[in-house]
Image: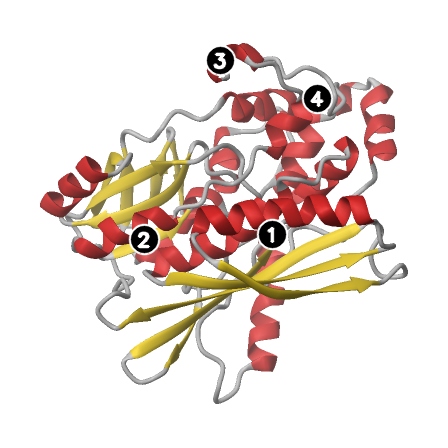
Amino acid sequence: MAGEDTEDERNTDEESDERNEGTDADRRELTYAEAGVDIDASEAATAALVGAASGPGRTGGTDGEDHGDDTGEEYAGLIDLGGTYLGLATDGVGTKLLVAEALGEYSTIGIDCIAMNVNDLVAAGIGPVAFVDYLAVAEPDEGVAAAVGEGLSAGAEEAGIELVGGETAVMPEVVRNLDLAGTCAGFASGEQLFPGEAQVGDVLVGFRSSGIHSNGLTLARQAATREHDYGDPFPEASEREGGTERTIGEALLEPTRIYTRLLEPLREHDTHAAAHVTGGGWGNLARMGSYRYAIRRAFDPQPVFAFVQDQGSVSDEEMYSTFNMGTGFVAALPPRDAERVCAETDGREIGRVEEGSGVAVGGVTIE
């Protein structure tokens, strides 16, 4: 299940009205729930859906993502084909679409759609091979459709997968502008699948994110537009490689990093489990097992996170419980294997798996 925070959204005019009110209340501390996404309620609704839809053929893949908000233990649904497993993941872009709409820039959201799906397969050790998309629109627009297709093509090329079809639905009474989602299929042998359970003593190898990726945008958008427009210059533009100026909207639209190239080195070494740090932030590490994940050397968050936190007066705990904060993927391996993976990739040791519970990162503990 996917689709980030769709029922609570307000249009850009409403955001502008709030921003221009200029009251002291506008500087209150924002939380994800206050912004409109109650993770506990989302988990309860997902559990109800899974319970009602369960049957002989229902296995794995109980995601209830806000982007997404992950509530299940599995990143992908698995079907045993007799020694080979078919993996399926489905997800959407979420309210990042509203930033794209505000800027009239749709060429990167297809990358996000591909990434959010293939990264979930990679976290299970599954090699993605094919993708189908679903584009729902209020009314057809050739220019927008072409831009979306451009991003899907770029994402598929980066992920090394085929675009094998899709569906475009015109539903003016259901969607206001557009919604984009998709499903990715992949394969793995039993030996290639990650066991899915970390072990005490494992080293946690982290891999940098490209930015906010495609979850938590309801909170990020409301924080970013309290005192600014999407078209305003991003305050930390000079810190971007090359010093290229960009707008606040462009910083939020930075495409999600695709992690398929990690599969080969992670499979070659003894990867016990992996986590895609997406909806629910660093709490996703707990999906590798009930242990304590002590993070001592996470990547520094990109400037966009500091901007969101400052503009929304968001607490550290809320930030790490909602966003990836600079680290988009984590794998748990024995120390020697972790050292080899770090040598072969851009990953680095960020922490250890210990007895206990919770994720200790950034000075906060997420239970």
Q: Amino acid at mark 1?
A: Asp
For marks 4 and 3, give the CA distance: 33 Å
Discs 4, 3 touching: Cβ within 8 Å: no
Image mark for residue 66 = 1
Q: Amino acid at mark 4?
A: Arg
Question: Residue 94: x and y, percent?
Answer: 65, 49
Seen in the picture, residue 306 relative to 272 is either above or below; the reply is above
Discs 1, 4 touching: Cβ within 8 Å: no
Seen in the picture, residue 31 relative to 152 is either above or below; the reply is above
The answer to whether residue 295 is left or right of residue 216 is left
Mark 3 or 1: in front is 3
Q: Amino acid at mark 2?
A: Ala
Question: Residue 275: x and y, percent?
Answer: 37, 51
Q: Which residue is mark 3?
A: 242
Looking at the rendering, which quadrant does residue 238 occupy?
top right
Nearest the viewer among 367 and 138 is: 138
The residue shown at (43%, 36%) is 209
Q: Secondary structure at mark 3?
A: helix
The residue shown at (79%, 44%) is 143
Nearest the viewer among 313 and 73 is: 73
Question: Residue 344: x and y, percent?
Answer: 20, 39
Q: Secondary structure at mark 1?
A: loop
Tell which circle, 2 or 1, labels the residue nearer the N-terminal end.
1
Tell which circle, 4 or 3, labels the residue nearer the N-terminal end.
4
Nearest the viewer among 280 and 172 is: 172
Q: Could one spot residue 36 in this view of the protein?
A: no
Mark 3 or 2: in front is 3
Q: Could one spot residue 338 in this view of the protein?
A: yes
Q: Which residue is mark 2?
A: 274
Question: Residue 246: x and y, percent?
Answer: 63, 19
